[in-house]
Amino acid sequence: MSRKDCSRLKKWLYPELAICASGEERLAALREADRPFEFFIALLVSFLLVVLVGLAALRLAALFLGWYPSDEAIDWLYRGGAILCLAMASAIHRVRVRKIIRDLLSPRGVMLCSSCGYDLMGLPPSAPSCPECGSPISKRFVA
């Protein structure tokens, strides 16, 4: 993947980075927000969730339907479970990184809701919450 394609992908994954003034600032925010250990934890949690739900589903199928999967079906269940784990971990990690990036941009004067990313620029001082998601707004954001 070329550097330009990678940059385009990061802008799509983390649209908050487009607000940064320079490429260095964007890279610094992404480095500080992207924590590989958190991805590992998300992967572990999603793996445990998929395994527990999968085992429960197999047990219920055997108990109520009398269905016992063949070896080929088990192989496909493993593959599907692995793909599901990666997708869940990626989604969890992306949501977490986007929230961290929004929190990192707030001291720089970028007014985004830390919950949903809504642009809070120009809200009246009487606005107690984000008009998009309803989460409370810090008083330093209200213009």
Image (tube, grey):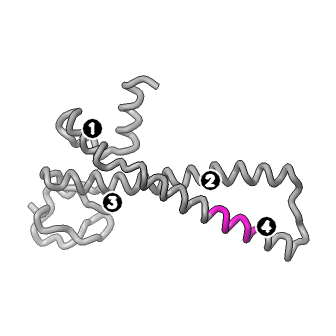
Q: Do the residues labelled 4 and 2 touch (CB within 8 Å)?
A: no
Q: Which residue is drawn at 20% across and 39% down?
A: 25
Crowding at mark 1 (Cα within 10 Å: few <14, some 14-19, many 20+): few
Residue 27, which numbered label? 1
User: Do the numbered discs 3 and 2 sit on residues whose CB atoms are within 8 Å?
Assistant: no
Frontmost residue, 18 versus 71: 71
Give the magenta range.
50-58
Separation (CA) of disc 1 from disc 3: 22 Å
Residue 138 horizontal/vertical position (percent): 17, 67
| Position of 104 relative to 66 (above/below) | above
* Residue ID for mark 3: 116
Residue at the far top: name it.
Answer: 2
Res. 14 image quadrant: top left
Look at the numbered disc 3 and give the secondary structure of its residue. Answer: loop
Q: Position of residue 6 (x, y in %)?
A: 40, 31
Q: Name the residue under label 2.
A: 84
Relative to residue 99, is residue 119 drawn left or right? left
Is 44 on the left or on the right of 106, as rendered? Answer: right
